[in-house]
Image: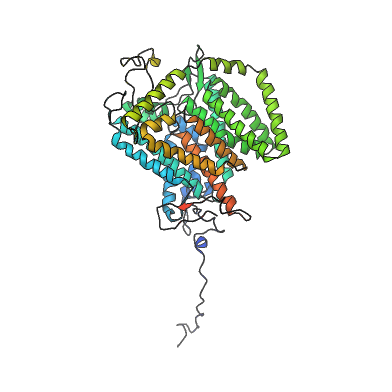
Amino acid sequence: MNGSSADGVRPAPFVRRRALPPWRRRGLRTRPMPGAVPHFGRTGRRPGPIGALRARLGPGWPLTVIFIGFPVWWLLGLGAIIFLLMTVPMALHLWRHRDRVVVPRGFGWWLFFLAWVMLGVGTLWADAPGAVLGGGAGRLFVFLWRMSWYLAATVVLLFIGNLSERDLPTRRVADLLALMFIFTTAGGLVGSFLPNLELTSPMELVLPNALAKNAFVYDWIHPKVASIETILGFEQARPQAPFGYANVWGSAYAFFLPFFIITWLIQGGRWRRVTGTLILAISLWPVVYSLNRGLWLSLGLMSAFVIGKILMSGNVRAVRRTLAALTVGALLFAASPLPGLIQARLDNPHSNNRRGLLAEQTVRSALTGSPIVGFGSTRDVQGNFASVAGGDRPGCRACGVPPMGTQGHIWLLVFATGVGGTVSFIAFFVVRFARHWRERSHYGIAGCAILLCFGQFLFTYDLVEIPLFTVMVSTALTWRARRTADAAPGGRPGSDAEATAAIALGPAAAEPAR
């Protein structure tokens, strides 16, 4: 029986098999782009119903859940909370693959900003010059809310940027953002024609009454389609559905618009182009009648940037189409009642004086009381600008003034994070714009146009929540498109390549994204 098995059959000789590469052992059919995080799931295990649905939706399923179901989340009172909830699986995915996570150039500025924001906890209860003295636990709640959004923006930037084009196609994310533009347009139309429509969400019924009636929480969990203001001397509806504020609606329209144009008007088929042109034309109604000067200015800024890129490209056909579109648009604009409405809005600056005085007092208080670190969060102003005894009263909400650190994200940065936080926040986005402003790809131009609008909105809008999240999604797409182009055959990695480095969560060394 020497050399034989028990049944008398000689065993087959041992054959040493060649070890599979790591990407094959993870179940991938093709070698992923260097630095790309592999997709969800584990091989060799039959997924359950939830796992099967997640596999069907792909690694980007948290984004799908957020954007496709957003109107439902808004009606449920979860329009803002769903963004924070869905960053949890994104963060877990990044943690599981932390040794392969890479970050964009300039990310050190953003990490410095996050660390600087945390320093504000120590000054939350410090008395600011010109602000109401004292403060309760609600100040910590507001601080944690904003900090959660900063972290969510960080997670979505790294999540999208580290997934390969195969796992999460750019077109899929762009389609989701374009769908959000359609939701924004629909909400704007409802707010324009049914401005008094309000609903009671399930979240209002579930939360304790004291928390549900808190003004800060109420604006996000209470579905309301418009705010009524008397800017021109008569009641005028400013659409805000499906968001919490009219200014958030304006920034969302501007940030989602480029992706709608790309996926519906440029890359779409004939039916998409026709339908998209109709949707775009209809969307101009709430844009104009919202009397939102910040949105008007941002659309002009984006248009000028895109037109400049087209003229610089030397594409004769594109230049002719652009000039023809501008001519037709100018004629339609001149023949419509819109110039008169816009002029009436400009003749009634409404909040300009109050905004200017608030910004002046905010900067003075921050630089006098805590110029380096800031005060951690906003503060209520003592009285109003006319008297320390002034303020809101029944029938005259305008008698008071907004808190210091509002009416513009730049003022929040100055007041809440001081000079250190303001400089690092702006530096990150300046670096990102500088890396991509020369690009001619659709997503490169769209990303830079959005960053330009973001810079303009800093002085007029509060951008901590959904707007900042959307800007980070756009920034991630632009960063990843640059990496993919540099890694493609014929790409030019090197001086023009997007340098990345492994994030300090694992043992991996710095790795170029090519």
Quadrant for residue 131, please give it.
Answer: top left
> Which residue sits at x=40%, y=31%?
412
- Number of numbered discs: 0
- Which image quarter holds the C terminus? bottom right
> Which residue sits at x=60%, y=43%?
439
- On screen, residue 354 versus residue 287, left or right, reads left
Q: Position of residue 482 (x, y in %)?
A: 57, 48
Picture layout, residue 297 above or below residue 319: above
Q: Position of residue 56 (x, y in %)?
A: 53, 48
- On screen, residue 420 versus residue 235, left or right, reads left
Picture layout, residue 31 above or below residue 66: below
- Which image quarter holds the N terminus? bottom left
Residue 284 or residue 353, whichever sits in front: 353
- On screen, residue 473 versus residue 284, left or right, reads left
> Which residue sits at x=30%, y=15%?
389
Picture layout, residue 36 above or below residue 426: below
Residue 163 visible in the displayed image: yes
Picture layout, residue 164 above or below residue 205: below
Q: Position of residue 325 (x, y in %)?
A: 69, 29
Q: How is the image coloured?
A: rainbow
Q: Position of residue 321 (x, y in %)?
A: 71, 33
